[in-house]
Every structure is written in structure tokens, then in C-alpha cells.
């Protein structure tokens, strides 16, 4: 048995972990994957050469690079029996907040909330692809990934068009208080998701969940919408909301292309 360690510089949260798991699924030489999200490390226990595994990790464009490979006597690994239940929990939370943020974003005329809702939907896709394709073929997973990726891109493009329309039009200011309140709850929801997922890890990693939360893209986005809401109020301008919306839509499209890579 060989043990290869990868550094994954863009692995900020469990959704990237799930992307990597799906990408490496089906490679017969892999015996176990051990993720250290706070330190952005992936340890792969495998037999034979690492070439195919390394190529698959690099193809995801998450900044993956091989650190070391060595032989190991470890042949037994703990399987997480509750993984499916945990994934259902975070899928439910993400999808619920997609609906909440999309609804409140439309009502309050906030593109920041609408964009953040699509980011929540993107995470739901990642968890959903893994869950709904459990026990299915690799081809089935690829088809689901392709549909999810293109659907996400279409929604983000519609968002970009709406941002442009509002930028050049004379739109009513978004409701800054709704932006801030809903984003605070979304921030809490993301923290809960990270905690739930880390319950399946070692106690040491659970204690590191705080560092994970503050390095998570999802949390940074939530904070960005909160700041945009404050600026909308003090500047009496919708531009901060449109700017954060544009940034998040770009991140959503970037995430969609990562999902599409799973369909190749």
C-alpha cells in the first residue's frame, strides 16, 4: 500500500471535498481518502502508480499538487456509516436557504441575496449529485453533473443580465435590512453545515472547525452581502449590492465549471 499526500490550495470547505471524492470515484487502485480541510491536505491510500490519481486531482483546478509518496503498512480504514445522513442534512440546509435567499432577494430587490442563493444551490448540487448517484454508475453521475453544471451557468448568466439592467436603469434601492438579516442567518447556516460535516471527523478536526469557517468561501460571501447592505444604507446607492452580486455570480459560474469537469 502507498500513501500519497496532496496539497489542495483551493479546498476551503466540504463541498470541494465532495467534488474531489466524486472525481476520484471509480479509480480501483484507491483504498481510502483522508481529507484535512483546515490544512488543505488530501492523503490518498492506494496501490500501484499515482499517475491517474494525480491527473484527476489536477484536472479539478483546485490548486492540487503532489507533496509526497511513501509506502505504508496501513490496510484498515474507518468507514463513516453516517456520511449519507450527514450529507442529507447539509443538502437540506443549503437548499432551504437557496429558497429563502432567492425569495427574499427578489422581494427586497437585492442581487447580492439572489446571487448568494445560487451559491447555496451550487453546494446543494454538489451534495445532491453524490447522494442521488449512490449505487449508480459513473455514467449516471456524469450525466447528473452535466445537467447541474449547465443549469447553474444559465441561472448565473440571467443574474449577470439583471445586474446590467439595474446598473444602467433607475431602480429602487434594495432593502438593506433584509440583506443584512438574511445574510446573518445564512452565515449561521453555513457554520452549522460545516459543524455537521465535521462531526464525522476526528475530535482534533472538530476543534479546528473555527479556522475552517473563517476560510470558507461561503462565509466570505455572506459577510460580503452584509457589508454591501450597510453600504447601500449609508451611500443611498444600489451599486454595492450590484458589485457583490456580480462577484458572487462569477464564483457560481466558476463552481459550475468545476461540476462540469466531473462529467468528462
Image: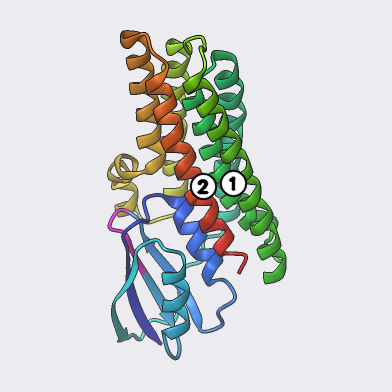
- Tag 2 near tag 1, CB within 8 Å: yes
In the displayed image of the protein, which residue is found farthest to the bottom?
48
Q: Which residues are magenta?
A: 38-42
197 to the left or right of 128: left
Which residue is at the front of the view, 149 or 166? 166
Which quarter of the figure is the C terminus placed in? bottom right
Q: Position of residue 110 (x, y in %)?
A: 50, 20
221 to the left or right of 101: left
Residue located at (57% from left, 32% from top): 161
Q: Position of residue 134 (x, y in %)?
A: 67, 62
Which class describes the residues within 10 Å of circle 2: few (<14), some (14-19), or many (20+)? many
Q: Which mark is residue 109?
A: none
**Type of secondary structure dominating the magenta stretch:** loop
Q: Which mark is residue 253?
A: 2
The image quarter containing residue 221 is top left
On whether residue 109 falls in the magenta region, the answer is: no
Residue located at (55% from left, 37% from top): 118
Question: Separation of disc 2 and disc 1 at Cα?
Answer: 5 Å
Residue located at (29% from left, 48% from top): 208
Amino acid at each position: 500500500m502507498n500513501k500519497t499526500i496532496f496539497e489542495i490550495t483551493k479546498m476551503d470547505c466540504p463541498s470541494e471535498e465532495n467534488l474531489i471524492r466524486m472525481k476520484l470515484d471509480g479509480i480501483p487502485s484507491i483504498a481510502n481518502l483522508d481529507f484535512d480541510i483546515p490544512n488543505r491536505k488530501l492523503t490518498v491510500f492506494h496501490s500501484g502508480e499515482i499517475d491517474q490519481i494525480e491527473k484527476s486531482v489536477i484536472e479539478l483546478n483546485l490548486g492540487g499538487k503532489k507533496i509526497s509518496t511513501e509506502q505504508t503498512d496501513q490496510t484498515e480504514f474507518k468507514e463513516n456509516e453516517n456520511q449519507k445522513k450527514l450529507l442529507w442534512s447539509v443538502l437540506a440546509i443549503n437548499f432551504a436557504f437557496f429558497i429563502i435567499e432567492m425569495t427574499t432577494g427578489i422581494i427586497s430587490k437585492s442581487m447580492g441575496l439572489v446571487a448568494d442563493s445560487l451559491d447555496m444551490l451550487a453546494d446543494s448540487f454538489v451534495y445532491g449529485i453524490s447522494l442521488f448517484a449512490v449505487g449508480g454508475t459513473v455514467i449516471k453521475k456524469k450525466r447528473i453533473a452535466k445537467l447541474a453544471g449547465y443549469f447553474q451557468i444559465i441561472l448565473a448568466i440571467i443574474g449577470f443580465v439583471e445586474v446590467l439592467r439595474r446598473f444602467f436603469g433607475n431602480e429602487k434601492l434594495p432593502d438593506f435590512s433584509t440583506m443584512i438579516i438574511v445574510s446573518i442567518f445564512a452565515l449561521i447556516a453555513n457554520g452549522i453545515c460545516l459543524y455537521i460535516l465535521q462531526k464525522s471527523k476526528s475530535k482534533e478536526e472538530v476543534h479546528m472547525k473555527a479556522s475552517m469557517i473563517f476560510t470558507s468561501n461561503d462565509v466570505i460571501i455572506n459577510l460580503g452581502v452584509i457589508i454591501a447592505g450597510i453600504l447601500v444604507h449609508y451611500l443611498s446607492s444600489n451599486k454595492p449590492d450590484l458589485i457583490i452580486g456580480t462577484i458572487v455570480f462569477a464564483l457560481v459560474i466558476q463552481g459550475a465549471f468545476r461540476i462540469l469537469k466531473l462529467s468528462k
